[in-house]
Amino acid sequence: MPTYTFRCSEGCYFDALFSMAEVPATAECRNCGGLAKRVITAPHLSATSSAAFQLLDHTARSAHEPAVVDRLPSRGVARPQRVTQNPLHAKLPRA
């Protein structure tokens, strides 16, 4: 939900959360109780990487747009086993 900044005639500033469809042009000042007008400010942009946003978008999209499979996986082709060279992995149980 976007944050909007308001300023009253007394010079008080405060922030308020409103949905974009319901944001009022004026609000009651939280400090002095006067009438405050909405102030145009710079948007609060996130510093999150695009990879993080892609993951969030993919997760949200998969909830209402699940991936559709157009054919069954083939049974005859076995996946190659990955072999590790790490000596610590030799102590792990084998499936």
Image: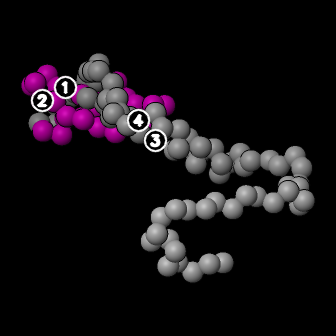
Q: Are marks 1 and 2 in contact (CB under 8 Å)?
A: yes
Distance between the Cα atoms at labels 4 and 2? 35 Å
Distance between the Cα atoms at labels 1 and 3? 34 Å
Q: Residues within 10 Å of mark 4 (few under 14, many from 20)?
A: few
Local SS, label 4 = loop
Distance between the Cα atoms at labels 4 and 3? 5 Å
Res 52 seen here = yes
Residue 15 at what x, y percent from top left?
Answer: 24, 35
Q: Which residue is mark 1?
A: 7
Answer whether residue 1 is magenta in the image: no
Q: Which residue is mark 2?
A: 12
Residue 74 at what x, y percent from top left?
Answer: 88, 55
- For the point 14% across and 22% down, the residue is 9
Local SS, label 1 = strand
**Which three-letter amino acid code belongs to the residue tagged 2?**
Cys
Name which of mark 1 and mark 3 comes first in the sequence: 1
Which residues are the magenta region?
Answer: 6-31
- For the point 66% across and 78% down, the residue is 95
Q: Which residue is mark 3?
A: 52
